[in-house]
Image (spheres, grey):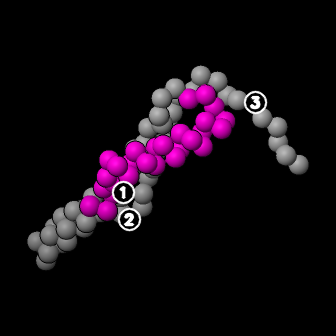
Amino acid sequence: MKRVADDYERINNVLQADKSVMSDACKALVLQDFAEKFNEYFDLIGLPRLELSCRNGIYKIDVSFEAERIKKFNVLK
């Protein structure tokens, strides 16, 4: 029974890792989209960075970027 549980865990880990793979082209497109949106509020220094991981079917996505300044904007009422 222990071997079956170990095999299940190994297979589950492989499947979860496979689901978390994002191609470089897709990642570049997502980062360009983020940069376009973030540029509405900040003066960015370079492109944002993205880290993606998946554990137990839950994705963790970290996006970070550097900016020279925060743009001023008015809030519409």
Q: Which residue is at a point 88% across and 49% down the rendered structure image?
A: 77
Q: Which residue is at a point 38% across and 52% down the rendered structure image?
A: 26
Q: Quadrant of the N terminus?
A: bottom left
The disc placed on residue 54 is 1
Above or below, 57 against 46 in this view is below
Q: Is residue 2 visible?
A: no
The quadrant where residue 57 appears: bottom left
Separation (CA) of disc 1 from disc 3? 36 Å
Magenta includes 36? Answer: yes
Tell which circle, 3 or 2, labels the residue nearer the N-terminal end.
2
Residue 7 or residue 49, whichever sits in front: 49
In x, y percent, where is residue 41?
Answer: 67, 36
Residue 12 or residue 48, whichever sits in front: 48
Separation (CA) of disc 3 from disc 2? 39 Å
Separation (CA) of disc 1 from disc 2? 6 Å
Q: Are marks 1 and 2 in contact (CB under 8 Å)?
A: yes
Label 2 sits on what residue type? Gly
Residue labelled with disc 3: 72
- Is residue 55 found left or right of 7 in the rendered image? right
The disc placed on residue 57 is 2
Above or below, 50 against 58 in this view is above
Label 3 sits on what residue type? Lys
Crowding at label 2, few (<14), some or many (≥20) Cα neighbours within 10 Å?
Answer: few
Q: Secondary structure at mark 1?
A: strand
Q: Which residues are magenta?
A: 18-44
- Is residue 29 found left or right of 70 in the rendered image? left
Q: Secondary structure at mark 3?
A: loop
The disc placed on residue 27 is none
Crowding at label 3, few (<14), some or many (≥20) Cα neighbours within 10 Å?
Answer: few
Label 1 sits on what residue type? Cys
In x, y percent, where is residue 14?
Answer: 22, 62
